[in-house]
Amino acid sequence: MLDRETVAYIKASKQRGISDEIIRTELKKKDLSEKEITHALHLADSLLKENRPSHSESKDTSSHSSKQKSSRSEESTGWSWGAFILGPLFLLAIKKYYYLFLYLAYFIPFINFLAVFGIPIFLGIKGRELAYDSSMFETQHQASGFMSAVDHAGKIMFVVYLVG
């Protein structure tokens, strides 16, 4: 019989990138019929598309979701040394290619003076927000780890620029 834990298991497996065939094999070991397995896979797919928790997850994470949103808003704001120093590389890494067009302002006379200072400052201010909104990361934890590494690299490069 199909239960909430099975749907949660399928959803978690799909989020980790496990193929439907492997999931089917595991579910057959639980003596589920092919019809039940197909129904559970479709249900998990629809939950993933809607980005909704399954019933068993909603009980566990309902109080935790407001904490995640508030922590995300705190982490996704603030200065980003990595985006400030490593601007074009940062934009390529988070797949925000259209922001690279800002660098065309370097070739416009009189505006290029403003662009040399303005674009890095803009990226320093908005870099975290751009990274957290990027489709590059599946979880907030991945985005947070990426930003931590990029900020460390940016701080090191800033010191190297000052010293060298």
Image (tube, rainbow, N blue to C red):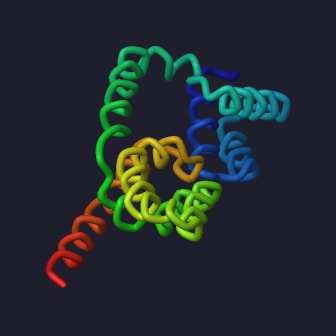
Specify the farthest residue to the right: 35
When the figure is inspected, residue 38 is found, relative to residue 95, above or below; the finding is: above
Residue drawn at the location 62% of the way across and 29% of the way down = 51
- Please provide percent x and percent y for residue 145: 35, 54
Residue drawn at the location 74% of the way across and 45% of the way down = 24
Name the foreground residue: 161 vs 128. Answer: 161
- Please provide percent x and percent y for residue 8: 57, 30
Q: Quadrant of residue 92 in the image?
A: bottom right
Name the foreground residue: 65 vs 1. Answer: 65
Q: Quadrant of residue 81 in the image?
A: bottom left
Quarter holding the C terminus is: bottom left
The answer to whether residue 100 is left or right of residue 31 is: left
Quarter holding the N terminus is: top right
Specify the farthest residue to the bottom: 164
- Please provide percent x and percent y for residue 105: 56, 62
The answer to whether residue 128 is left or right of residue 99 is: left
When the figure is inspected, residue 15 is found, relative to residue 100, above or below; the finding is: above
Q: Quadrant of residue 141 in the image?
A: top left
When the figure is inspected, residue 18 is found, relative to residue 56, above or below; the finding is: below
- Please provide percent x and percent y for residue 7: 63, 28
Residue drawn at the location 83% of the way across and 35% of the way down = 34
Specify the farthest residue to the front: 110
Name the foreground residue: 19 vs 3. Answer: 19
Q: How many marks?
A: 0
The answer to whether residue 39 is left or right of residue 4 is: right
The answer to whether residue 156 is left or right of residue 41 is: left
Residue drawn at the location 50% of the way across and 63% of the way down = 110
Specify the farthest residue to the left: 163
Name the foreground residue: 72 vs 3. Answer: 72
